[in-house]
Image: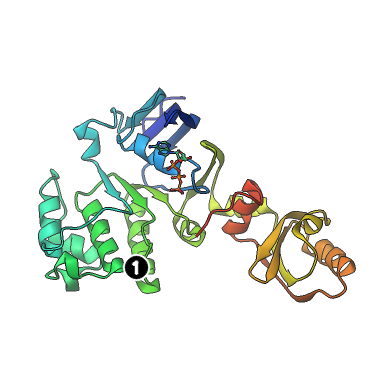
Amino acid sequence: MQDDLSAIATLANVSKRLGGKPVLGGLTLRLRPGEVTALLGPNGAGKTTTVGLLTGRLQPDAGTARLFGLDPTRPAARSRMGVMLQSAGLPDVMTVSELVTLQSGYYPDPRPVAETLAVAGLSDLARRRCGALSGGQARRVLYALAICGRPALLVLDEPTAAMDRAARQALWATVRDAADGGTAILLTSHDLAEADALADRVLVMDHGRIVADDSPAALRARAGGSVIRCRTMLPPAILRALPGVRDAGPEGADQRVVTSDAVTTVRALCGADPNLTDLRIADAALEDAIAALLGPDRRIAA
Ligand SMILES: Nc1ncnc2c1ncn2[C@@H]1O[C@H](COP(=O)(O)OP(=O)(O)OP(=O)(O)O)[C@@H](O)[C@H]1O
């Protein structure tokens, strides 16, 4: 890999085995300032392992991991990173403000606590004990802990899980603000609408490799255009053989058909099933693009 002085974090040809099994094979990626990178993939694709290598929780078996040009296990590198994990617990008896103050003290140049609370939408909850927070509020505290040290790299693992719509959109806005201010963001999510809304760049992983690296718009364009939903007795294997079809499968009581040529597919569909009902056509979403890329058996579960 070429040197890239603007890279915040890099993996160069990294391989990793866990439990005697190859998990990552020759993975290369770099995170840049001001860019929101979404790391997506089905369960077991290797996303958590990749994040573990970038953040120094795991060591590569082969290849090189660098965080701010240093070994990611070095405290000097880690202190410039903020991480919001899915599963981290909070101490029940501390208030939100006490916890953010404590965490801020670990960083050389933290934000003022009041500012961190405001950015995370927690000003009104500052005196609440962590044990008395809802699931969505607790997630906002984890976000506050991740941003309080003004990180140059912010790692967000399923950041809006358990958040309601308003909290989710508020968090998206602060993540975009952080990126606009130059912070590199690495986002893992099973919520493809979230990745579409936030990411400048989407890395799709499968079986320990990156199978696509592009903007959400470019990935959607690659899917080829349209999604047809309808009620039909035709099985997915027959639907996949129709002209223009890239992917097909059940979605509730409907069949969902991704096509590069909606008109030709619809004509063939109506010819093949005269009893077809409830026909709807929409533009392809990121979800459709990734489903077409991974194939019918490797869906990303929301
Ligand atoms: N400590 C471990 N020992 C053995 N195998 C492991 C270990 N950790 C992860 N694996 C395996 O490595 C593969 C990749 O796991 P990883 O957690 O990186 O996937 P993921 O993409 O984050 O999945 P998910 O979306 O389910 O969180 C999986 O097959 C998993 O079972």
Q: Residue at x 26, y 53 (%)?
A: 88
Q: Does the residue labelled 1 lie within 8 Å of ligand 1?
A: no
Q: Residue at x 30, y 36 (%)?
A: 57
Q: Residue at x 40, y 50 (%)?
A: 187
Q: Quadrant of residue 75?
A: top left
Q: Quadrant of residue 176?
A: bottom left
Nearer to the camera, 189 or 174: 189
Q: Is residue 164 left or right of residue 142?
A: right
Look at the numbered disc 1 and give the secondary structure of its residue: helix
Q: Is residue 90 left or right of residue 220?
A: left
Q: Is residue 217 left or right of residue 11?
A: right
Question: Looking at the picture, how far across and down is residue 76, in whole percent?
Answer: 20, 33
Q: Is residue 64 left or right of residue 96?
A: right
Q: Which residue is drawn at 78% across and 70% down?
A: 232
> Would you say residue 273 is visible in this rendering?
yes
Q: In which quarter of the image is residue 93?
A: bottom left
The three-letter code of the residue at mark 1 reads Ala
Q: In this view, does 140 lie above or below 221?
A: below
Direction front: furthest residue: 19
Question: Looking at the picture, how far across and down is residue 263, in whole percent?
Answer: 81, 65
* Colouring: rainbow
Nearer to the camera, 93 or 28: 93
Q: Is residue 128 above or below residue 26?
A: below
Question: Looking at the picture, how far across and down is residue 260, in whole percent?
Answer: 75, 56
Question: How many numbered circles are shown?
Answer: 1
> Would you say residue 31 is visible in this rendering?
no
| Ligand 1: quadrant of the figure | top left
Which residue has dot 1 on it?
170
Question: Looking at the picture, how far across and down is residue 120, in whole percent?
Answer: 25, 63
